[in-house]
């Protein structure tokens, strides 16, 4: 398998050749919050795959929902005014649970095309309302909004831009709220004030509110290193966008579906976005699916636009019935105890990781619910990052693996955690204990 992999399978982001030094591992099976590899080794999956298997592995009821739908109607297009029962029922169930008037749901295949969908629908919205010049988009440094060309442009990771001619000249960034390394200091009010000032300044720099279509933010920045904004940050940014007539898009691809506690993280900040993107936990990784939520105002403007061409955006697999059937069953599981278990497990995880703060290598512990990070430094007072030349990400990932733990190791020595919501107390404790062991071994 390894030979075939090397010869033929192109891995996402980093090639096999990039991973060759530590070796590629093949996963065989999974159950609950654990995965088993080719060598028969069972590990706690502290990252739920790629922050997506929120419900955990091995739910027969999800498998049965998919099989039933495949037998009955494996495919139905949403084109030509057609539809399928699971897609309609899932849209209605999600709209009922979404914040505010986010009553309209557009299903995609994942998060990147959900982000693409928002960009296209927002351009359409601005055009239909007679403001086609409102065509500039703003997002945050350290933000991640996907790997499609448009999503990668909104994303602020250098590897997604170099060699690709990105971002587009209509895609702009402002600094993150990143509390641990914020030039404005760590005071919440100062961070919020700095972000508001940065957004105002960027809007002016690109030609004023008449030119800016939308601002994108994750309720907690995931791939940037699990950066949690201060309480009130999202509300303040959302309100400024409303004042400036700029659409506020909450990218909940990671934070949605119980990852931070509630079904949608923006509800914790009392924010109702104009649009919201979700994916990952929507189907818990069993099948691909994303969902874009649109407010009444945005949807009604577009839908009343130009007859049959009004939305003007569609995929062959928009609103796939099998994915929708899985989504319905996953939602049932969340509300049948998984969300509650996730909240309990999240408190235990955060408490356990906070206990690691006195370790000589730990500079910062942050997170909410089952979305957390530990940032390693070699000098706590100076917040000196681990030397990049030592390749901390790869070494830590490898070390975690030999300790029976899967975590995300970011390039700058940040460890990311996003275990499934079904985690038991023993599994949460194992995640924390094994992390301490990894840190001790890193110190050696
Ligand atoms: N937005 C955010 C916030 C994400 O974290 C991700 C994926 N990690 C995406 C968009 C893209 O989603 P996908 O990988 O499903 O295309």
Image (cartoon, rainbow, N blue to C red):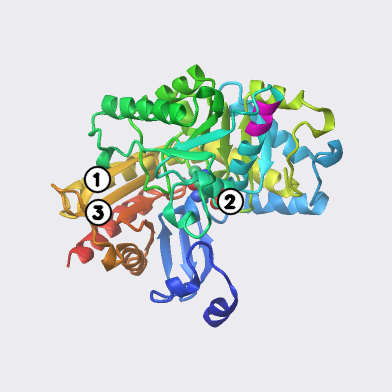
Which numbered marker is on residue 376?
3
Q: Quadrant of the C terminus?
A: bottom left
Spot occupied by residue 174 in the image (x, y as percentages of width and height): 40, 36
User: Which residue is at a point 35% across and 68% down the rendered structure image?
Assistant: 398
State the separation of the CA atoms marked 1 and 2: 33 Å
First reached walking from the N terminus: tag 1 or tag 2: 2
Choose between 125 and 264: the one closer to the eye. Answer: 125
State the separation of the CA atoms marked 2 and 3: 32 Å
Compared across the picture, whether 353 is left or right of 335 comes to left
Q: Is residue 73 above or below residue 132?
A: below
Pointer 2: what residue?
Answer: 149
Choose between 29 and 128: the one closer to the eye. Answer: 128
Main structural element of the magenta stretch: helix, strand or loop?
helix
Would you say the beta carbon of the disc 3 residue lies within 8 angstroms of ligand 1? no
User: Which residue is at a point 58% across and 46% down the rendered structure image?
Assistant: 150
| Residue at the extreme right | 80
- Residue range corresponding to the magenta coloring: 122-127
Q: How many marks?
A: 3
Q: Is label 2 in a helix, a strand or a loop? A: helix
Spot occupied by residue 402 in the image (x, y as percentages of width and height): 34, 69
Mark 2: few/some/many CA within 10 Å (<14, 14-19, 20+): some
Compared across the picture, whether 105 is left or right of 185 comes to right
Q: Is residue 29 above or below residue 142?
A: below
- The answer to whether one can see residue 55 in this image is no
First reached walking from the N terminus: tag 3 or tag 1: 1
Pointer 1: what residue?
Answer: 364
First reached walking from the N terminus: tag 2 or tag 3: 2
Quadrant hosting residue 96: top right
């Amino acid at each position: 398998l390894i030979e075939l992999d090397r010869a033929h399978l192109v891995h996402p982001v980093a090639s096999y050749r990039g991973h060759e030094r530590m070796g590629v591992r093949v996963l065989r099976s999974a159950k609950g919050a654990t995965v088993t590899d080719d060598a028969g080794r069972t590990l706690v999956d502290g990252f739920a795959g790629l922050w997506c298997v929120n419900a955990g592995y091995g739910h027969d009821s999800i498998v049965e929902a998919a099989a039933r739908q495949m037998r009955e109607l494996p495919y139905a297009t949403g084109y030509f005014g057609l539809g399928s029962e699971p897609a309609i029922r899932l849209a209605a169930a999600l709209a009922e649970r979404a914040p505010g008037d986010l009553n309209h749901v557009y299903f995609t295949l994942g998060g990147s095309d959900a982000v693409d969908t928002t960009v296209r629908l927002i351009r359409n919205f601005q055009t239909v309302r007679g403001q086609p010049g409102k065509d500039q988009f703003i997002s945050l440094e350290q933000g991640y909004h996907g790997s499609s060309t448009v999503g990668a442009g909104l994303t602020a990771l250098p590897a997604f831009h170099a060699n690709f001619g990105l971002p587009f000249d209509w895609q702009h960034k402002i600094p993150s709220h990143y509390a641990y390394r914020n030039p404005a200091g760590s005071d919440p009010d100062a961070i919020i004030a700095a972000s508001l000032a940065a957004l105002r300044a960027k809007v002016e720099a690109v030609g004023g509110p008449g030119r800016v279509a939308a601002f994108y933010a994750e309720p907690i920045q995931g791939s940037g290193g699990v950066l949690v904004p201060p309480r009130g940050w999202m509300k303040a940014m959302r309100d400024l966008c409303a004042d400036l007539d700029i659409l506020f898009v909450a990218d909940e691809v990671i934070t949605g579906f119980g990852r931070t506690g509630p079904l949608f993280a923006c509800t914790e900040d009392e924010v109702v976005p104009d649009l919201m993107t979700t994916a990952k936990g929507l189907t818990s990784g069993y099948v691909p699916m994303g969902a874009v939520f649109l407010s009444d105002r945005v949807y009604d403007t577009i839908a009343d636009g130009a007859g049959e061409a009004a939305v003007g955006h569609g995929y062959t697999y928009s609103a796939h019935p099998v994915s929708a059937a899985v989504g319905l069953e996953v939602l049932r599981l969340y509300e049948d105890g998984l969300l509650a278990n996730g909240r309990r497990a999240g408190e235990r995880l955060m408490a356990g990781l906070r206990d690691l703060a006195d370790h000589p290598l730990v500079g910062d512990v942050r997170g909410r619910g089952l979305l957390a990070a530990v940032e390693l430094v070699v000098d706590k007072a100076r917040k000196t990052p681990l030397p990049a030349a030592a390749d901390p990400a790869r070494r830590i990932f490898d070390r975690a693996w030999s300790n029976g733990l899967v975590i995300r190791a970011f390039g700058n020595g940040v460890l990311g955690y996003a275990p499934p919501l079904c985690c038991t107390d023993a599994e949460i404790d194992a995640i924390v204990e094994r992390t301490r062991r990894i840190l001790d071994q890193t110190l050696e």
